[in-house]
Image (spheres, rainbow, N blue to C red):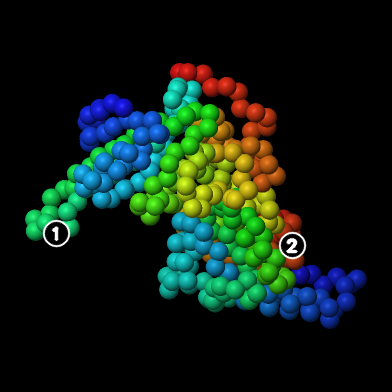
Amino acid sequence: MEAVSAPDMDEIALLSDGLLDAVGVLRREGFNMLLDIGCTDHHPLAPRFELSYHFLRFDLHQSAPAPPDRFRLRVFPRDDEPRVATLSHLWPVANWAERETYDLFGIVFDGHPHLRRILMPDDWKGYPLRKDYPLRGFDRSFNPGGRIGPVPPLRES
Amino acid sequence: MEIGPQQPFLTTRLDEFISWAQKSAIWPMTMGLACCAIEMMSIVSPRYDSSRFGAEVFRSSPRQADLMIISGRVANKMIPILKTLYAQMPDPKWVISMGACASTGGVFDNYAVVPCDTFLPVDVYVPGCPPSPDALIYSLMQLRREIEAGGKTAVLARNA
């Protein structure tokens, strides 16, 4: 775990084991809003996946409202079997954000009540926003311009 | 439609009457999927009035419509829904593929957007992103010419 100060807001990078502890600390500090859960695929670099959680601390009872404090949490799950703890029991917004991340990247969220695809059709194979998924998809009856055969290994550019 | 010596007079007149009736009252179905739907909505506005061509009302139920204007990009999650709706439309039915995304995939060269003629028979394609309401009205006129001629090839030959 290391504390890095990014140019726009404070952030911490950690492995997926420490997520629930860090989130508990943040809640005690007063960060009461989870904005969104985003994911980046850095393939072929390692670690491959990077989840970014953005938190907001605002005070509703202030007479003169100030811009809220922001914080970012960067979580790096394992490459081969990416599993992260869910935050849907703490913040309901995490429910669909985690479903979207699972649908497009394949990161499994342990403890999620209803983890299934949300954007792609239910029986879709593959995770489209990974770097080794072809942009045009694979060749199917409704997708004749798609890729035939497996994707060649990516080079580190 | 020419009346030749080998064609009986009454049934020719009946065919003409039927095709006139069909082309004069084409009721579209609301299939506004994306941005092209805005242009499709504007053809019922007073400026580009489509009801003077017979497209009086846009029926939401496929059972009461005979034209499906696919306006917007079609995702592959939408394919079974469109096929179901097309099957629910009674004969005779026509399809206008409006815009670049519905006809060919448009700006989207990816896994998700599908051209609609891979799973539906299309009668008229309208190019544009989005096509102006004039273009959609022109495609409606083209469909009327097609109905009157009884098929596509006669229209192509006549308008060449």
Q: How many marks?
A: 2
Q: Mark 2 lies on which chain?
A: B
Q: Mark 1 lies on which chain?
A: A
Residue furthest to the bottom in view is: B10
Q: Quadrant of the N terminus of chain B?
A: bottom right
Q: Position of residue A102 (x, y in %)?
A: 50, 43
On screen, residue B148 above or below B132: below
Q: Where is residue B2 in the image (x, y as percent from the top left)?
A: 79, 70
Q: Is residue B108 left or right of residue B150?
A: left
Q: In this view, does A7 lie to the left or right of B58?
A: left
Element type at mark 1: loop
From the image, tell me which residue sits under label 1: A61
Q: Which of marks 2 and 1 is in front?
A: 1
On screen, residue B112 above or below B135: above
- Separation of marks 2 and 1 at Cα, in angstroms: 70 Å
Q: Callout 2: few (<14), some (14-19), or many (20+) C-alpha neighbours within 10 Å? A: few
Q: Which of B45 and A65 is in front in this view?
A: A65
Residue shown at 25%/50% (left/top)?
A32
Q: Which of B58 and A98 is in front in this view?
A: A98
Would residue B27 be visible to someone looking at this image? no
Q: Callout 1: few (<14), some (14-19), or many (20+) C-alpha neighbours within 10 Å? A: few
Residue shown at 25%/28% (left/top)?
A3
Residue shown at 82%/72% (left/top)?
B3
Q: Where is residue A140 in the image (x, y as percent from the top left)?
A: 68, 42
Residue shown at 63%/55% (left/top)?
B79
From the image, tell me which residue sits under label 2: B151
Q: Nearer the viewer, residue A62 or A45?
A: A62
Kind of residue indicated by mark 1 = His
Element type at mark 2: loop
Q: Position of residue B64 (x, y in %)?
A: 63, 76
Kind of residue indicated by mark 2 = Gly
Q: In this view, does A37 lie to the left or right of B71?
A: left
